[in-house]
Image: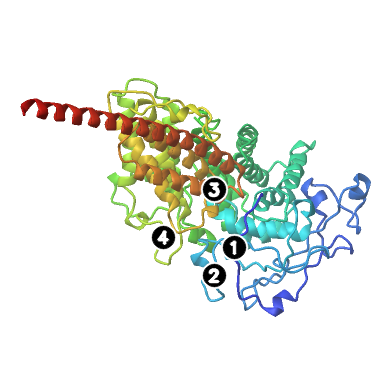
Amino acid sequence: MEAESTASTTGSSPRSSGRKATVASHDRPTGSSACISCRSLHLKCDRLPICSRCSTQGIKCIYLKSRRGYRGSDRNGIQSSWINNEETGSQNPGELELLSTTFSQGDTPSKISSSVDFQQVSKDWEPTTPSSRTNGQACRQRCIEAFFHYFYDSHPFLPPRNEFLQVLDGNSIGHLETAICVIGARYVPIASPTSFTIEFDSILASSSPPKDASMVQAMVLFALALDGCNDQKRASQILIRAQSLALELGMNEREYAVLNNLGSLIYEESLRRTWWELYIVSVVAAGFHGRGTFHLSNIMFNLPLPCKEEEFAAGCIPPFHTIEEFDGLPFSDDNIEWSSYTYRIAAVRNLERILQSNVLISPDNSTIHRQDAYLVNWGFHLLESKMSYFDQFGTFDEMLFQAHMITDVSSILLHRNFSRLEDLAVQTRMSCTEQTQALGPTTDSIHALKIAQAASNISKLVALPIPLLRHTHFFICALALSSITHLSLWSALPAMAPDHDLKQQILMNLGGLKAVAGAWPAAEVGYRQVSKVAQKIYSNRKDTMRDVFWLDFIDKDIMTGLIESAAAIDT
């Protein structure tokens, strides 16, 4: 199953359910838009009911209905033109639910999504089989909605939903729409992620693919989708291609976003965030997957740091601040309210330092202590407003969540080569950490305590009251690394030592992997691998405990006989 249907919605009005989405592939389109195929390849379209190019190539010709004049959702909170219940006349009531959290008509959407005004999705669909999946225009629309509901907050570098729809309507960026659908389709049961993947691959393979910022954004999203599907090699190749194009365009320069902002401060901020997100994804993918190197190292850039999410969504972009100002904060009287995105960047910079140092030396080396100081100081100097994952309005802070996750994974990567843990559990290669080395012996138990604490912190993140599907898929790899540590500790415990807490943490991680396996194949692979190793350790411990029990029983029987013999002699 490639997607996960969750809690149902309530409050759907007859007014909205009576509307029908218009699919423009059978009538002559209105407006000036080209068909999706022509737009994605930046080719001129003659806008016939089935355009000449699509007719010649024998492909489906689909027109995107114009969103000019969009007035938002109706008074019942259900958007009229995007969330409708008919797809090319083949669907009936009873199928799709796209909410991971049940909320009634009176609930506040902002408490469910930090920056997206997600509209309730109607459930008037009929159950389908994989063979009946389709990627028609109505399906594409639902994939875009699913992207902004489930995925956007975990990698918020595109403009917020409403602003993005305006950009999509006025520009030929069908390639970016397709990349969004590759991800969104993983949350929509009737959609086919494979078809969208093939579509985007054809754009990449074309003789003249787009060469602008929207293509960099599309490739970052596509790489994230491939990585979540366990295709790490292909994801790395796409990231390298995105990095090359971004550098060619000069997106690492401060002036680029200002000169290419389309007259919008929100889009200008989005361009800056695109470079930062490319940097973050490149470092995290290299570190979490054990590759150790990434292709943006030693690249100089002077971009301002991202603003807060609520400022980005409202278009109220504050004065710029730089990474140099952030580094000097503890030694300055400046009272700057840094964004959670900035703390996420700081966490990634610490991970980058660890990857570049490539510490494979003695455990008392000063490099280890310096890298550890970076990690510890990151937590010490969090602002008071960043001490909780939820703000005063109950909105979850995904950027802060990821910053803590990255910091804990960094601690595991820094200390694991010098821990005292046994290597039984890590002899099984994990898909997310394919080059993870065995946790070898050392004379310093502090390193083992450090990674044990970090692994425990990652497990605690699973218990936060937020749907796990809303997190970045990199959380899957964090859970895999955490599980390796728990399993190693468990296997090293004496047979009769209490192991309840460790077993609960392992079960917590398994539950987290299982919860997102319906959307991301990497989680399903990780779940199977962790389960297999856990079963082996559990079986070994049971056998050992049985042996200890019988040895103890025999010893007690022998001792009882000796005591009785001694008593008989005395009498």
Residue beneath disc 3? 514
Q: CA distance from mark 1 to mark 4?
A: 20 Å
Assess whether mark 1 and mark 2 are in contact (beta carbons under 8 angstroms).
Answer: yes
Left/right placement of residue 325 relative to residue 293 reads: left
Quadrant in the picture for the C terminus: top left
Residue drawn where x is 79% and y is 47% of the image: 42
Establish if 62 lies above or below 125: above
Question: For residue 81, which quarter of the picture?
Answer: bottom right
Residue drawn where x is 65% and y is 43% of the image: 222
Establish if 351 lies above or below 468: above
Residue beneath disc 2? 103
Q: Position of residue 288 (x, y in %)?
A: 50, 36
Amino acid type, mark 3: Lys
Q: CA distance from mark 1 to mark 3?
A: 18 Å
Q: CA distance from mark 3 to mark 2?
A: 23 Å
Question: For residue 256, which quarter of the picture?
Answer: top right
